[in-house]
Amino acid sequence: QCQLAATRPDLVIRSLRGNVGTRLSKLDNGEYDAIILAAAGLKRLKLEARIRQPLSPEQSLPAVGQGAVGIECRLDDAWTQALLAPLNHAETAVRVRAERAMNTRLEGGCQVPIGSYAELVNGELWLRALVGAPDGSQMVRGERRGPAEQAEALGISLAEELLDNGARDILAAVYDGEAPR
């Protein structure tokens, strides 16, 4: 929401609740002029034809770990870990580790306006992130590049840069309930 508000302050942004079908019905019934949904969800439901304009990371950074599927198991359960090991996608795991390290350092949660996107480019990790006021009036962006083996360190380093460049004040206002919505 904060990224859209920063890019298009002329829009009236409203919350939209419900499952995908409910949301699309509200769009079809004219309750909304446009809605933003996860492309993966629409594809999973065989509704690709409803996708009008995908958003690139350059247009809107997704939430931390967006699109990654995780499976948890007990640390002491070697049998289950061995069973799950072939499902691990190493490149995705590296990307998510960088994003999560950044988010952890920022003390981010579900309602905090933090976006990030990590990708591997020629074996190098490229991590982009932002922290924004919910209304889009303030936005702090940064990026880091480095060895994939240093995913967590890159995430923490980028978080420190964001905090030093104004994210600390934005996050404090959000947590204190003083951020403009």
Image (cartoon, rainbow, N blue to C red):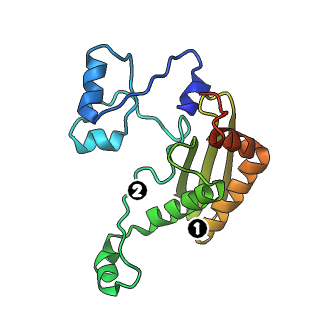
- The x, y position of residue 102, in whole percent, is 62, 57
Q: Report the residue at 52% width, 17% height from top.
A: 11
Residue type (three-letter) at the residue carrying disc 2? Ala
Residue under the image location 66 percent in, 40 percent down: 176
Horizontally, is 72 left or right of 11 in the view?
Answer: left
Determine which quarter of the picture holds residue 123. bottom right
Q: What percent of the width, then of the height, locates residue 64?
A: 51, 51
Local SS, label 1: helix
Which is more toward the observer, 22 or 115? 22
User: Which comes sooner in the sequence, label 2 or label 1?
Assistant: 2
- Dot 2 surroundings within 10 Å: few (below 14), some, or many (20 or more)? few
Q: Which mark is residue 148?
A: 1
Residue 89 tag number: none
The amino acid type of the residue labelled 1 equals Ala
Note whether 83 is above or below 35 in the view shown.
Answer: below
As drawn, 133 above or below 71: above
Please identify the quarter of the rendering in which residue 5 is found: top right
Report helix, strand or loop for mark 2: loop
- The CA span between labels 2 and 1 is 17 Å
Q: Nearer the viewer, residue 74 or 89?
A: 74
Q: In the drawing, what numbered circle is on residue 68?
A: 2
Q: Nearer the viewer, residue 162 or 124?
A: 162
Pinpoint residue 45: horizontal percent, then vertical percent.
Answer: 22, 41
Q: Which residue lies most toward the left here?
A: 46
Quarter holding residue 118:
bottom right
Dot 1: within a 10 Å radius of its alpha carbon, few (fewer than 14), some, or many (20 or more) residues? many
Farthest residue, direction front:
176
Q: Please state which of the two labelled residues, at mark 2 or mark 1, is closer to the viewer.
A: 2
Q: Quadrant of the C terminus?
A: top right
State the residue at coordinates (79%, 49%): 164
